[in-house]
Amino acid sequence: MEEHPIKYASRLLNSAERNYSTTEREALAVVWALNKFRGYIEGSKIIVESDHQPLKWVMKLNSPSGRLARWSLQIQSFNLNLEYIPGKSNVIADMLSRLDYDQEIPSYEENT
């Protein structure tokens, strides 16, 4: 079966989210995408490729608490497999996060 993106999306972090740790930001991105694309992916096997290896432990927390506990439970409700991809092999995924957002960016959605 050929893999392909179903849609591209991104968003800016709010002021509180900018204070999150890198792992929390990565987990937030996964949870946000799962919720945004729920209608497309619910009931399907999902592969999340990330260059942030510590993200894998979020799904396996023994006694989670707070924000990470909520996110872990949300993630576990999907048939999701998290795969580590080294950063040098994952250049497209990080493209939007590396843009300079000092300028006004038009908002639009593009279906593929």
Image (cartoon, helix red, strand yellow):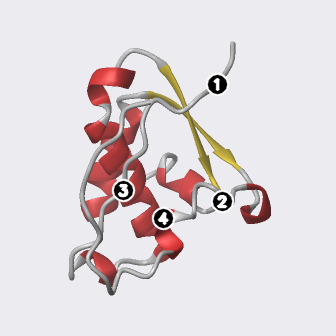
The quarter holding residue 41 reads: top left
Residue under pointer 4? 96
Of the residues under marks 1 and 2, which one precedes in the sequence? 1
Name the amino acid, label 3.
Ser
Q: Alpha-carbon distance for marks 2 and 4?
A: 14 Å
Cα distance in 3D space between marks 4 and 3? 7 Å
Name the quadrant of the C terminus.
top left
For marks 1 and 4, the one nearer the N-term is 1
Q: What's the residue at 58%, 52% (across, down)?
A: 56
Q: Can residue 29 be seen by looking at this rendering?
A: yes
Name the element at disc 3: loop
Rendered image: mark on residue 10: 3
Specify the label residue 44 is tagged with.
none
Mark 1 → mark 2, Cα distance in angstroms:
18 Å
**What secondary structure is marked by label 2?**
loop
**Cβ–Cβ under 8 Å for marks 3 and 2:** no
Real-space CA distance between mark 1 and mark 4, rounded to the nearest whole angstrom: 21 Å
Residue under pointer 2: 51
Whether tag 4 and tag 3 are in contact, CB under 8 A, the answer is yes
- The reply, left or right, for residue 76 in relation to residue 37 is right
Image x and y of residue 42, in percent: 34, 20
Which of the two residues, 26 or 3, is positioned nearer the viewer here? Answer: 3
Disc 1 marks which amino acid?
Glu
Badges 1 and 4: C-beta atoms under 8 Å apart?
no
Numbered disc in front, either 2 or 4: 4
Label 3 vs label 2: CA separation?
A: 17 Å
| Quadrant containing the N terminus in the rendered view | top right
Q: Amino acid at mark 4?
A: Leu
Q: Which residue is mark 1?
A: 3
